[in-house]
Image (spheres, rainbow, N blue to C red):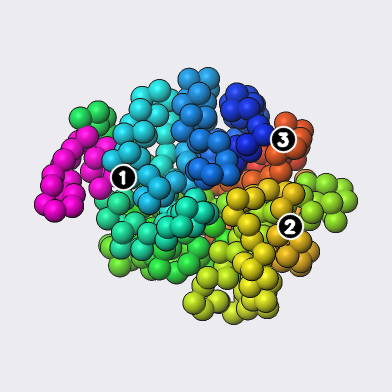
Amino acid sequence: MKIGVSLGISPREPIQHTVEVVQSAEALGFDSAWIADVQLSMKDCFSALTLCAVNTSKILLGTGVTNPITRHPTTIANAFTALKELSDNRAVIGIGTGWTAVYSVGEKPSTIKQLERSIIDIRSLCTGEEVEGNAGSRYHLVTASGKIPIYIAANQPRMLRLAGRVADGVILMGGASAEFTAWQIDQVRRGAEEAGRSMSDIKLDLWAAIGLSDDRAQAVDEVRHWVASQAETFSKWRELPDFLRPFEHEFKTASDAYDRLEHMSQHAGHVASVSAELVEYLAFVGTADDCLAQIRSLEPLGLDRVTLAFRAGGRQQRMEAIHQGIIAPLNAPAT
């Protein structure tokens, strides 16, 4: 199983530092780096991805994630065509309906139908095909240079089924629970079956936060900010699956408290809205051995990758610990 890293660029963090983090991630065996696209509370992801492309050689580079509301499909297609060129074909489009980036400017996330159309258009634009715009207009991308993989970030059933129908990969935005992940993969499978596709055509990438510490309470506190952001999205679900219902009150509390201008900030007040129990359900927490055991328990589900998010402070030390305690053992020859 491959291990990726999810990053956001804090307003206080030099973009060059993010490039150095990605270079280090490549050297430590992470196979991919995904940078958040949240325009008001984080620095620009495409500026960072461009620098990463020309300063690395192996690691995959993607948005984690963009959306078709704050970025038009033509803009996404053109930007990724350039990133594909600069990275020598290592670009991956991570896309969703939009959440914090969209709500923070008073817009609404795209509908699933709009997202599906956007993905079809982006794919067509990247391969040089003509697409139809508003009022019957037709256009194509003159810089097109070929297909770029598109991963849909999803956690709700309809989005997961959309990923099964049209995506090259799915970013499973739920958490570290095997129960939750299996449920999500089943939804993707249903979508694939509807479209006559094989699951082997769809990469499965589980995203979750990781808190590494011998002190379990400290490990939990390290990832509360990530779990609070997930809880806020779950509050909008029309119907929760049975295994999430015990946390329904926490989802509402997180939603009421959430400050989108402090998205993913460890210092935001809303991080206190989630319990240790919820954190342990949605994130990998504990020692490296604890987290490795959690990840190994997911192997029977057929995941291609687990992408890890962790606090910005001490990233180098954490990546080295993940390499030593998780990546190296996962890649070790069977004995």
Q: Residue lying farthest front?
A: 106
SS for tag 2?
A: helix
| Corner quadrant of residue 233 | bottom right
Residue topped by disc 1: 73
Q: Is residue 317 left or right of residue 132?
A: right
| Corner quadrant of residue 199 | bottom left
Q: Nearer the viewer, residue 111 or 120?
A: 111
**Amino acid tagged 3:** Arg
- Mark 2, other Cα within 10 Å: few <14 / some 14–19 / many ≥20: some
Residue topped by disc 3: 315
Which of the marked residues, 2 or 3, is nearer the chain's N terminus? 2
- Mark 3, other Cα within 10 Å: few <14 / some 14–19 / many ≥20: some
Residue at screen point 46% across, 33% down: 46
Residue at screen point 84% across, 51% down: 218
What segment carries the magenta color? 121-141
Q: Decide: is 262 above or below 233.
A: above
Q: Is residue 204 left or right of residue 324?
A: left
In whole angstroms, how far apart are the C-alphas of marks 2 and 3?
22 Å
In whole angstroms, how far apart are the C-alphas of marks 2 and 1?
35 Å
Mark 2 or 3, closer to the camera? 2
Which of the marked residues, 1 or 3, is nearer the chain's N terminus? 1
Residue topped by disc 2: 269
Residue at screen point 31% across, 34% down: 78
Q: Is residue 18 left or right of residue 153?
A: right
Q: Nearer the viewer, residue 283 or 274?
A: 274
Q: Position of residue 39 (x, y in %)?
A: 50, 43
Which of the marked residues, 2 or 1, is nearer the chain's N terminus? 1
In whole angstroms, how far apart are the C-alphas of marks 1 and 3?
33 Å
**Amino acid tagged 1:** Pro
Q: Residue lying farthest right?
A: 215
Q: Decide: is 15 above or below 77.
A: above
Q: Which mark is residue 3?
A: none
